[in-house]
Image: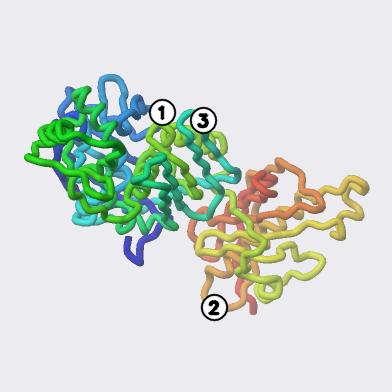
Amino acid sequence: MDINFNPDKQHTLASSVSISGTGLHTGINVDMTLKPANAGFGFQFQRIDLPGMPVIKADCDLVTDTSRGTTLEQGDTKVSTVEHILAALVGMGVDNCLIEINGPEIPIIDGSSEPFVEIIEETGVVEQDAAKAWYTIDTNISHYDDVKRVDMTALPATHYHITTLIDFNSPVLGTQHASIKTINEFKTEIAPCRTFCFLHELEMLLDNNLVKGGDINNAIVVVDKPVTEEEMSRLAKAFGRTKVEVKSEGYLNNLELRFPNEPARHKLLDVIGDLALIGYPIKAHIIANRPGHSSNVEFAKKIKQYIKKNKHTKDIPIYNPNQQPVYTQQQIEKTLPHRFPFLFVDKIIELSDKQIVGIKNVTFNEFFFQGHFPGNPVMPGVLQIEALAQTGGILCINAMPEGQYDTYFLKIDNCKFKQKVVPGDTMILKMELIEPIRRGICIMRGSVYVGNKLCTEADLTAQLVKRN
């Protein structure tokens, strides 16, 4: 991601790009082509080797097997080991891509996401003319597995970052952790990290005629028990080598680790790939203790259900009282002609060319509470609309050429009052331009929130008039 990358826009590939390799478990040689896709397409896999070339969406609800990687299945269509390519796409900022394959499994290549990152870089990532709808969470979402001792939590955050911890009671691995503060770090810090397994797991897989495409160069094998010469000969034969050795550090052959904590970093890679199956880009801090594909997918399902249930809240502004305001009340008074007792905006916390967010702290000392429902104070709806109008006025004036302007509201449509506003509430006033300003006419959509509850909404039309 370069310095001009806009994380609030959707992205796809500049052109198609291909890579070929062997499937880790099937041993089948597979050609994979990544293709550009339209905004909103997401990630979808297409089996071009099957009749009708069926397509299957990258969706946690379609996962049917997590025993040796993550497998998607719908009807007669199956795609295995999808996590590494999905991690590469997410890590490189791609939102929409069609992944064509002519076999049942994604190529393993070197067991990391780095080869996929390289071909994505080769073709390039392009911005699309569509906003990226990030989904935030306002409560902790957790997943526990007492049997596997897995503990995964998503915490509210302003961006997507991940921490993983692993502890397999292995003297070779010890306790390891890895983290990335932003997804921009994926390419250099996480993508090169290869998958790993323990020797006893490898022997079980070989006994069951699996890992047919395995090679000691595409996986880190942790030797967690004494190994006889006979076992070493068997492993060498399985991997097509004349000889394999156990390194003094406790890894099979003379493999050089790319990072001291490469296994923990690869677990983080898997978390990114598996959580791509949520189907929605999220802003959260993911803490994963002893994660695995099964737990990752179950966790993804929990997050997906939370998002579907709270989808209507995805555009609710988040108010942090410690945040430095864009406009203080003194600066607001330089823009608007309103003064006490008719200035209903305390500060502006967000301002762009199309959207503004203001704050109004409602107190019992407001003048209107003396006569509006005494003994049961409720802020008048008309004054909530006035607060929105004033906030929108700043948005419109900010978009005009230099000079002093007044805004006169012409019309209010689709006005609804859904929740009452009372003393002690903090009103979050959001105004969005529905269409560009033409001839001084502004059409905006306004929303009043208290916390994550929508209290009032309306469409407002105003005219900007330059002061004489």
x and y, in percent, of residue 218 in the image: 20, 43
Q: Nearer the viewer, residue 29 or 305?
A: 29
Report helix, strand or loop for mark 3: loop
Q: Is residue 311 shown left or right of residue 93?
A: right
Q: Is residue 395 shown left or right of residue 41?
A: right
Q: Which mark is residue 146?
A: 3
Quadrant (top left, top right, bottom left, bottom right) of the C terminus: bottom right
Residue type pointed to by label 2? Glu
Report helix, strand or loop for mark 1: helix
Whole-angstrom CA distance, mark 1 to mark 3, is: 23 Å
Location of residue 413 with respect to 240 vertically, above or below: below
Q: Residue at x 58, y 63 (%)?
A: 350
Residue type pointed to by label 3? Asp
Location of residue 93 with respect to 333 vertically, above or below: above
**Which quarter of the picture shows residue 420?**
top right
Quadrant (top left, top right, bottom left, bottom right) of the N terminus: bottom left
Q: Which mark is residue 61?
A: 1
